[in-house]
Amino acid sequence: MKRKSSLSPLETLLESRRGAVLPLPPRLARLYGRMRMPPRSRLHVFSNFVTSLDGVVSLAEKGHASGADISGFNAQDRMVMGLLRALADAVVVGSGTLGADRRHVWTAEEICPELAGEYRTLRRALGKTMPPLNVVVSGRAAIDLSLPIFASGKTPTMIVTTFGGIKRLRNAPPTVAIAALRTRSGGRGATIAASAIVDAVRKVHGASWILVEGGPRLLGDFYAEGMMNEQFLTLAPQIAGRDVGDRRLSLVMGKAFAPRHPLWGRLADMRRGGSHLFMRYAFEQSK
């Protein structure tokens, strides 16, 4: 069920002091407050998710698999998602995330159209003349190339796949960049290394600020390789619950870190919008 929410300013509870203050347009600055990011001369990989109080990021049910069901279709969460996409040079998603929202395009304007003008103004101020590169990671490459992300022309796109998967992309339009990468063996079979994904994206697009929007298994690969600098996390005030054997997902899937190799983050920023908390955790890269 959709919940009513307004696009009202966030209350700053803790503010990050690292990085330079970005030139947010007046309305965005009023809604979010100050936003800092590291120099663009340095690679910075960050992620954004919304989770329930009991740690669910996706209900994994047809028609209810996106983060909107977790946030309660919260307008402030959409605003923050749009802001992070507006900052990003590239947005990386897995094939599961694409399958959960097949009509979506990963741009700021798509998630929060009421702030489209402000997002475009911000990108121009940052010297970004194009929308962020949308990157889909899929080992098998069983992808519908007629989906809007590939066919609408709203954003440049790239598919990262394997040497086996590339055979399914013979009819891909020339506007879609394709990178075929080697796989490595892991707990859930052959996977593409997160570091290789980042290298491929940077080779094609020269991206410095890379936003990873999932899914949880792809995010787990980035954390396992020490490739994640920051986690933006919206905590929604709902209990989603789980049943035995259901397919509901948590923030990271397919990887186990604690107790042998726990990954501890540092709370760098926290804002409040009603009963939603918007947090930013810093992680030390190991690579």
Image (tube, rainbow, N blue to C red):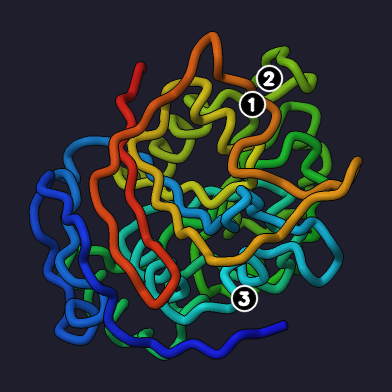
- Quickly name the residue at label 2: 183
**Dot 2 lies on which element?**
loop
Q: Earlier in the sequence, mark 1 or mark 2?
A: 2
Instruction: Say the numbered circle drawn on residue 38.
Output: none
Q: CA distance from mark 2 to mark 3?
A: 30 Å
Q: Earlier in the sequence, mark 3 or mark 1?
A: 3
Instruction: Say the numbered circle drawn on residue 192.
Output: 1
- Amino acid type, mark 2: Thr
- Quickly name the residue at label 3: 152
The residue at the point 50 percent across, 13 percent down is 261
Residues 112 and 129: in front is 112
> Crowding near pointer 2: few (<14 within 10 Å), some, many (20+)?
some
Q: Is residue 126 left or right of residue 267?
A: left
- Amino acid type, mark 1: Ile
Residue 272 locus on image (x, y percent): 33, 68
- Amino acid type, mark 3: Ser
The residue at the point 57 percent across, 69 percent down is 71
Q: Is residue 52 left or right of residue 31?
A: right
Above or below, 112 against 90 in this view is below
The residue at the point 53 percent across, 52 percent down is 213
The residue at the point 84 percent across, 47 percent down is 247
Q: Residue furthest top?
A: 260
The answer to whether the residue labelled 1 contacts the one labelled 2, judged by CB atoms less than 8 Å apart, is yes
Residue 80 locus on image (x, y percent): 38, 68
